[in-house]
Amino acid sequence: MASGGEEHGHEEHALQVFVFVIALLFAARLGGRLANRIKQPAVLGELLAGVAVGALGLLQGSFGNFVATTKSDPILHWVAMVGVILLLFKSGLEENIHEMKEVGGRATLVAVVGVVLPVAGGIAFTYFLLPGHSMLVYVFFGATLAATSVGITAAVFDNFKFKSTETRIVLGAAVVDDIIGLVILGVLSAVAQGGEVSGSFIAIAVVKAVGFLGVSILLGRLLAPSISKGFSRLHSGPEMKMAMALVFCGLYAYGAKVLAGLEPIVGAFAAGLVLDAVHFEKFEEPEIAKKLKLWAGLVEGKRVQKELELEAEHAREGHVEDLIEGMTKFFVPIFFIVTGMAVDLRVFKDPQVLLMAGGLTIVAFVGKYACGFAAGKGTNKSLVGFGMVPRGEVGLIFANLGKSYGVLNEKSFAIAVVVVIATTFIAPPLIAKAIRKSQNDELPETKRQGAKAAAVAE
Amino acid sequence: MASGGEEHGHEEHALQVFVFVIALLFAARLGGRLANRIKQPAVLGELLAGVAVGALGLLQGSFGNFVATTKSDPILHWVAMVGVILLLFKSGLEENIHEMKEVGGRATLVAVVGVVLPVAGGIAFTYFLLPGHSMLVYVFFGATLAATSVGITAAVFDNFKFKSTETRIVLGAAVVDDIIGLVILGVLSAVAQGGEVSGSFIAIAVVKAVGFLGVSILLGRLLAPSISKGFSRLHSGPEMKMAMALVFCGLYAYGAKVLAGLEPIVGAFAAGLVLDAVHFEKFEEPEIAKKLKLWAGLVEGKRVQKELELEAEHAREGHVEDLIEGMTKFFVPIFFIVTGMAVDLRVFKDPQVLLMAGGLTIVAFVGKYACGFAAGKGTNKSLVGFGMVPRGEVGLIFANLGKSYGVLNEKSFAIAVVVVIATTFIAPPLIAKAIRKSQNDELPETKRQGAKAAAVAE
């Protein structure tokens, strides 16, 4: 146990980070709640709470310094990463793999259109309004607008407990989107570093990505039944099942990154899709189930009896979502508040930057919104379009890459960052609006109440 | 959001740590389950699983290196720290502050005896069997045996869902124990660094520690009612309540460390004691509660009706424990497996070390066991005694300090570490045995079944 002393040495810093993380959780909840108060999705409030905290880091004095240094603490960013991985794992668990396959074609189309339009638009816009740069600069601007950050959209869907063809198309499109983004990223890195880009390079990247997803999902589906059986047999309460589900999620997330170069969240989503099929019987019969059975025996009246028995059955069935719920409640909000914290308000100081960014944001917005029309008839096209708008951390990866290769200068980088921020913050209210609309159109009175309730809950 | 790129850079390492932590969770669960199989508390299995993982770190090759480096990763140790803080917070929540006060006197006596005996014994033993060292060396050996690591004992109590006068005495004694240990630590540090130790120094340390606990608990108890009211009024589901409970826990843990120099877990325990009084009505009426009410209206027969109504009421009431349960299931096992991982099996190679350590372990064991007799009549003295035996991370802090000041040489340090390890691993089975015995003595047949069930559950 020789690390005891070491631990003791780091202890105070670790404690500070613990208190900071908890304070962030509280701030995120507060922001989320205020957002719900004004009928906005919690995630918007969580992002804005992050911006507020980030601003504290600009203050002079020891407190400002503490925030400024702690906001980039690796432990904090680890918690945020776990948060977004669990969020996409959850989204996968709540989706049905067969229904996903049904929308596969449309999702791919949406993704392709959703990449082509903003990239083309971005290149054209910057080419004409930021003249005198190399073509590579314009391409980087375009690329920054390419990829959707599905985390934001997934959180809004989750907030409204909303599931439909549209949610499936958006989530599916985001996966394809990530594959395309991966290829663009690879190509740009090669070019920026003065390398050659062969067709085989692109082919290999695509094959690896598609291959990984295909194999892992297929494999998972073959294993799912035996996993279910295993889960039911495990005589060890929910703890062991939770650990197994997490191992599954972790391996897929890691495999996506290491074997296929995909974002870990894509792997986590795939893991969720696979485990969605997994149900199991709880080992320890819950107290409530026992009581319900007892009552079923005692009461007169077949109908109530039947209901009591059904409820008892239901109480015995476990779902993977339930196993990780407590964890998601802690980790997920940290991801959004950390995303918000990363906003450096100083980039808004330069009016020219804002002007350019404003224009480019419109291009970025219209390009993704338009791809909603590729969703085909019978779907709420604005909902799909809005769902694809947020760029979040994915767009930043491009911008940062461009900066690190010296392709984007300080000003160009600032512009790209503002565009990413804008798309990330515009989207949630619009998605929420579209969801409410489609719910009010489609749902009978009773369900609509439920939807409203869900909207203000969380 | 300018940290996007950075994040991307650290991403692969963060992912590896994520997968490693999850693998550890799985290993801990496996160990815990096997331990339960042979009627041992889960924590013993989790500790041993940690030793096994630690041994993997001794392997040659990249895997061995990966384990060896990752086992000291700050993120992993942060997760472990959060785990033990949440564990003691939970223990506090499950204890009753009034009942704690009743045993206060006896707990203090147990703590004092439990420090004096092993310290005196340790000094005498090493003085005669390790001659030729300075007095400070012997004092350090004695000090290493002083403090109890309550985490281990708390986990065993938790495993058996066991609560009694004895658990209260042990938990209370561990708090007093920590105050005494704090003073000894301060004095030794001063002496080892050749400083003077004034009586005022000691007085200040004690006043700070006792003052912090007194004020924070008093303050918390005054606030508890209004917190309860606030919790029930919060129209924001359990998420916000969970965040508030964690803020409370975090501030107490941090305050204990920074304001009073106590272990953070002592602060977390105090926070739990205070919040134990907090109950609240769930904002969203759970589905099951609605149904139960409905059925209560439908069924004939007053008795079932009444029961259904009561159950519906019960389903509406929330407790702070429930809010953090999901988190504890993830964080707590990591603490124990990390504690086990810190065991460096190489210290067992030297037979002379083992011989000395064996003797000193007996002293360490008897010293703490004997303090159980200070618990007064009407209590299960062995249970209290065994509960005080484990030294865990607290003993290591002393050993490491002695080493870092050059007071303990490599061999002396190895001896001290082996003693700490031994006390930590002997205790859980003995505590479990004592609990089962007292349960079988006191409980009627039916309850005994329950106790057995609890024993194998988890």
Image (tube, coloured by chain):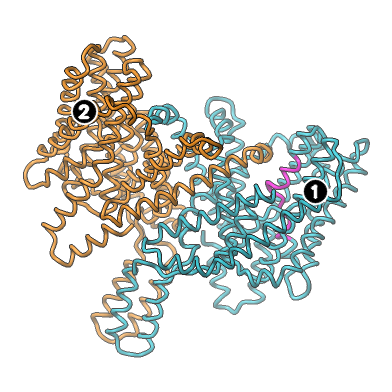
Chain colours: A cyan, B orange
The image shows residue A367, relative to residue B207, as above or below, that is: below
Q: Is residue A178 left or right of residue B410?
A: right
Q: Is residue B109 left or right of residue A1?
A: left
Return the residue at label 1: A184
The rendered magenta stretch, by its main secondary structure, is classed as helix
> Was residue A370 drawn as part of the magenta stretch in this picture?
no
Label 1 is placed on what type of residue? Ile
Q: Residue furthest bottom?
A: A301
Q: Residue at x 75, y 52 (%)?
A: A147
Q: Residue at x 25, y 11 (%)?
A: B134
Q: Is residue B366 left or right of residue B222?
A: left
- Toward which corner of the image does residue A191 lie, by quadrant? top right
Distance between the alpha carbons at the discs numbered 1 and 2: 65 Å
x, y (%) of residue A381?
Answer: 75, 68
Circle number at residue A72: none
Q: Residue at x 13, y 43 (%)?
A: B382
> Was residue A391 drawn as part of the magenta stretch in this picture?
yes
Which portion, as a residue range, is magenta? A386-399
Circle number at residue B360: 2
> What is the secondary structure assignment of the residue under circle 2?
helix
x, y (%) of residue B372?
Answer: 13, 39
Point out the image quarter for the N terminus of chain B. top right
Q: Is residue A308 left or right of residue B122?
A: right
Q: Residues within 10 Å of mark 2 (few under 14, many from 20)?
A: many
- Toward which corner of the image does residue A90 lie, by quadrant? bottom right
Label 2 is placed on what type of residue? Leu
